[in-house]
Image (cartoon, grey):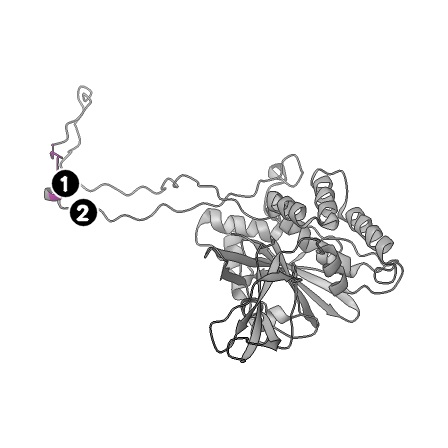
Amino acid sequence: MDYITKLRYVNKLPHHVDGNRRNTVIRQYQKWKGTSHVPDQVNEHLFWSTQKNAMPLLSVVTDSPWQLLDKDPTKLKGVTKSKATPNFVPAQGSTSLPTSSSSKKRKADVKEEPANKIHKTSSTISPTGLNWDGDNYSCAYDSLITVLFEIWKDNLFSWNVNANFLKSKYLETLGKGFVMVSQGNNTLENVRDDIRKLLHTKNKNLFCYGRVGTSLSDLALEIFRSSVNISHSQEQCTNCDFTANRREDELGSVFVLKATSTLSTSHALQTFGYNSANSCPMCLANMRVEVFYTYFPSILVFDHTVYFIKPSKDIKFRGDDNKVVHYRLRGLLYFGSFHFTSRILSLDGDVWYHDGMQTGDKFVSHGHRKFMSDDDWQKCKGRKLVMSIYMKIS
């Protein structure tokens, strides 16, 4: 704690290490440096950098609520004010200290912390990335799979339910591979290579080997492809109340942003539709087709490849049952100079940057989402945002 205080005094702490409680600021520092980091001034006999003696990440502590106490004794019903009496006998020849109510007590130097309340958080310290394959260019796979791995870690049950419902063999294969990785029996690179082999077997032209690029759009569409319809469309008259019957639509987990999507990903999803070629049978006015989800997938992917649109941090809308559905931004993928990179947003709001070519399997902290502007989201190290990924949280 002394070392953190010194760093704050000389203004060398990053802006996201801003806690105002001891446990809070230490936890933020651990997430920045990692639990194995040991400051230089710590005695070597106290080192905790080894795996056996690693310092655990401090849990989240919720402060107890403040309560104003009324000091008026007349308002304390059922309480009788009594005079304090000593409960000891002074030694012979000694003098007792006065115990009058007017004598002031010195405040305690240390206050006991309120009981800890543990909340479920996202990933522990830093996310885990993939090493780039320079012989078989893998950056499209690396950027997408690193984000999906973090989403899987945060809700294994939701991932499995979604994969089973969509009947997606790729999501099921990824889920099984992620389990092996979490148990230490496999690597993310092997999981990537297994998925790549399946995709190459299905379409050798789209998913090639060698020093050639892969379309991230094609990759996402194929991984999230499903034989199950999760959306419907409905024609509605723009003039009267006529509404046609619903019919199944092709909209799936991947949402390709179009020219009409000009504000944000949230606005694009909530206003998704297009003009119909049919006329209203009642008043002959123009018809419009509204498209909506009947099953909300646990992951939504927005393809920004063609249009430069702001990614919303949260997306909320109501389903048919009037229940609010809430998605949170979890991943941003960028492209430039024939290379893909990614950013991951934890459920706590921490932002991490990954480039398998430069950082290997490590991530670099990019602070906290509350300190980032819209421009910060849409560009990263000279590369343009081409995909945003959301996780359903309620």
Residue at x-position 70% and y-position 56%: 224
**Which kind of residue does numbered mark 1 sit on?**
Leu
Q: Quadrant of residue 263?
A: bottom right
Q: Note whether 98 is above or below 2 in the view shown.
A: above
Q: Does residue 37 show up?
A: no
Q: Relative to the observer, which residue lies in front, 317 or 109?
A: 317
Residue at x-position 78% and y-position 60%: 139
| Horizontal and vertical percent position of residue 135 | 88, 58
Mark 2–mark 1 contact, CB under 8 Å? yes
- Label placed on residue 70: 2
Give the magenta-colored segment's residue range.
75-82
Q: Residues within 10 Å of mark 1 (few under 14, many from 20)?
A: few
Residue at x-position 60% and y-position 41%: 43
| Horizontal and vertical percent position of residue 198 | 82, 51
Q: Quadrant of residue 329?
A: bottom right
Q: Relative to the observer, which residue lies in front, 37 or 382?
A: 382
Q: Residues within 10 Å of mark 2 (few under 14, many from 20)?
A: few
Q: Note whether 226 is above or below 272 in the view shown.
A: above
**Count of marks placed on residues:** 2
Tag 1 residue: 76
Q: Main secondary structure of the magenta part?
A: loop
Residue at x-position 74% and y-position 43%: 177
**Which kind of residue does numbered mark 2 sit on?**
Asp
Q: CA distance from mark 2 to mark 1?
A: 8 Å
Mark 2, secondary structure of its residue: loop
Q: Relative to the observer, which residue lies in front, 49 or 267?
A: 267
Task: Report if residue 13 lies within the magenta region.
Answer: no
Mark 1, secondary structure of its residue: loop
Q: Earlier in the sequence, mark 2 or mark 1?
A: 2
| Horizontal and vertical percent position of residue 138 | 81, 58
